[in-house]
Image (spheres, grey):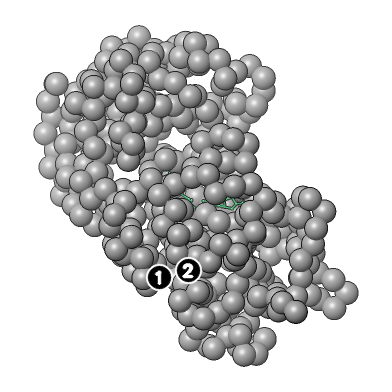
Amino acid sequence: MTTTPAIAIIGAGPSGLALARLLECRGVSYIIYERDAATVEGITTLGQPRAGGTLDIHAATGQRAIIEGGLLKEFEKYARYDAATFKLWDYHGTQYIDHERGSDFPEIDRGDLRKIYLDALPAEKIRWGHALKQVTKDAEGLTVLEFADGTTASGFKLVVGADGAWSKVKALINPVAPQYCGVHYIESRINPDNPVHAAVQARVGKGMLIVGGPNKLITMQNLGDGSYRVYSGARVPADFSTDGQVDFGDTDAMRSLVLSERFFGAAWAAEFRDYIRHSTDFRPWPLYHVPPASVAWDHVPGLTLVGDAAHLGPPSGEGANYAMTDALYLADKIAAHDGLEGDEALDRAVREYETEMFERGAGLIKRGVQMIDMFFTEDSPRPMVEMFSGKGVPIKEEKV
Ligand SMILES: Cc1cc2nc3c(=O)[nH]c(=O)nc-3n(C[C@H](O)[C@H](O)[C@H](O)COP(=O)(O)OP(=O)(O)OC[C@H]3O[C@@H](n4cnc5c(N)ncnc54)[C@H](O)[C@@H]3O)c2cc1C
């Protein structure tokens, strides 16, 4: 007879995988249910590349979860410590910042991070192809997981929603819907065989380049395979990518759209427009967040949330780091209370985790919202230049 694991983790993203590894190290039994059908790196169930190719993992947060999970050596094999470079330009082609952020901010491809964890976790502790449909409480108050394929699972002492922005676990805990931030990014790629790849490589290097213009932004980032991800951001309506007007599968139409006045029209430097003209694999990334004040709820025994499921914010470069930090705090609290010996002790551990996480999570969202306001302004990139200058980053204005 198999015993039900103490903890069910929904989702094998950075938060769910970090939590699983930390529980494994602490001898707490768990199982992960993941929607993706297979372990294919960076590919979603829909067969599309997962958004957010590379993540910078910070020393004080994400790296701590990796170290506590005993995976630093593996992390170092994949982490790109020389990728922490940052350039800031304006849309006319004037450079303001060319800065080396230092070794506390190595980049790692999202797929590599997943691989490190999957290599370290027993394969039988992950159930692939298990898309959670809903969570309910039965007549005895026990949590029941219902999956899209009609199967169910129950008997866990704790169910942790690590299922991202549109969490199904959240419905029973804190049913606050994410709200649109007013901005869409259009993600595209420049692969190594692209005719403009050498020019992009010379311009962006191994790190990141941000180009700011009136209410628009281009971000370009290097990935481990040498390709570049391009994020073209603008203020557009919430239904921009779903109203049927834009066909993301039509590469030529997408290039025309992104080069139109709605995005990066004639006023933008020819060089950046040329990069867009050669981009491929366009896909939408509408930005959503929950109100910071909503990251606080009355504890529901037997359930909790980590990562984006708990505190979805606009991108701030910290989402994955905070997601992994949640995992670390939760695992530590459970271990400290020897939580699984009694329901009350486990409950206390989760409450303590949530109290600490609420403030941290709300702060993350506030910073993300401030960043959107700073990025998408009429006089962009001026506010960014001032912000970095205030942090002591050297500013040198030069036409390149
Ligand atoms: C383009 C982009 C760039 C980013 N860059 C950075 C960065 O540089 N640094 C940084 O710190 N953060 C970054 N972020 C944010 C970061 O990716 C998220 O904050 C982080 O991934 C959150 O981790 P998570 O585990 O909570 O959720 P997710 O990464 O969303 O993982 C959720 C997991 O749950 C699974 N799942 C979802 N629904 C279900 C279901 N119903 N049933 C079962 N499984 C389910 C999903 O398939 C997925 O595997 C970026 C995000 C994007 C989109």
Q: Nearer the viewer, residue 394 or 137?
A: 137
Q: Is residue 291 visible?
A: no
Q: Is residue 288 visible?
A: yes
Q: Residue pushed farthest front?
A: 1
Mark 1 residue type: Gly
Q: Quadrant of the C terminus?
A: top left
| x 77%, y 50%: residue | 148
Q: Is mark 1 within 8 Å of ligand 1?
A: no
Is residue 151 depicted above or below 350 in this figure?
A: above
Q: Are marks 2 and 1 in contact (CB under 8 Å)?
A: yes
| x 34%, y 31%: residue | 227
Question: Residue 120: x percent and y percent?
Answer: 45, 64
Is residue 253 depicted above or below 138 in this figure?
A: above
Which circle marks residue 69 in the picture?
Answer: 1
Q: Quadrant of the N terminus?
A: bottom right
Which circle marks residue 21 in the picture?
Answer: 2
Q: Residue pushed farthest right?
A: 139
Which circle marks residue 129 in the picture?
Answer: none
Q: Residue 398: which quarter of the image? A: top left
Say whether disc 2 or disc 1 marks the residue closer to the N-terminus: 2
Question: Residue 111: x percent and y percent?
Answer: 44, 46
Mark 2 residue type: Arg
Q: How many marks?
A: 2
Is residue 342 depicted above or below 391 in this figure?
A: below
Question: Residue 207: x percent and y percent?
Answer: 26, 39
Q: Nearer the viewer, residue 163 or 117?
A: 117
